[in-house]
Image (tube, grey):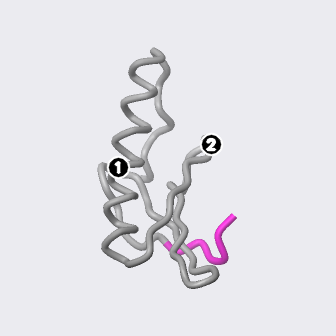
Amino acid sequence: MMADDACYTIYKGYCLECAEEDGELHGRIAGIRDVVTFHGETPEALMDAFREAVDDYLEVCGEACLSPDAAAP
């Protein structure tokens, strides 16, 4: 779990929650039951990783014929 529950940005309706640890940014898609995490060395890299994680999450759910958890309201 991240240090705080702030939603820093939204992509395709999914919320980025992040924290800094040991000089690296760690993030996760907040508000879903599945655990999807990623990291980046800079805020820009974290944003790229977040977008890629959301896209991958939606693609994997589609390929597995599973409904993804709903995006944040």
Tag nearer the camera, 2 or 1:
1
Magenta segment boundaries in residue numbering = 1-6
**In this view, 40 is above or below 29:** below
Q: Residue furthest top?
A: 65
Q: Is residue 17 left or right of residue 45?
A: right
The residue that appears at 37% across and 77% down in the rendered structure is 43
Residue 49 location in percent, x, y?
A: 38, 58
Q: Residue furthest bottom?
A: 23
Numbered disc 2: secondary structure: loop
**In this view, 42 is above or below 65:** below
Q: Nearer the viewer, residue 26 or 54?
A: 26
The residue that appears at 45% across and 26% down in the rendered structure is 61
Of labels 2 and 1, earlier in sequence is 2
**In this view, 9 is above or below 57:** below
The residue that appears at 59% across and 72% down in the rendered structure is 5
How many residues crowd mark 2 within 10 Å: few (<14), some (14–19), many (20+)? Answer: few
Numbered disc 1: secondary structure: helix
How many residues crowd mark 1 within 10 Å: few (<14), some (14–19), many (20+)? Answer: few
Cα distance in 3D space between marks 2 and 1: 18 Å
Residue 6 location in percent, x, y?
A: 52, 75
Identify the mark at residue 52; answer none if there is no mark: 1
Q: Nearer the viewer, residue 67 or 63?
A: 63
Q: Which residue is mark 2?
A: 33
Residue 67 location in percent, x, y?
A: 47, 25
The answer to whether mark 2 and mark 1 are in CB contact below 8 A is: no
The residue that appears at 33% across and 54% down in the rendered structure is 51
Dominant secondary structure of the magenta stretch? loop
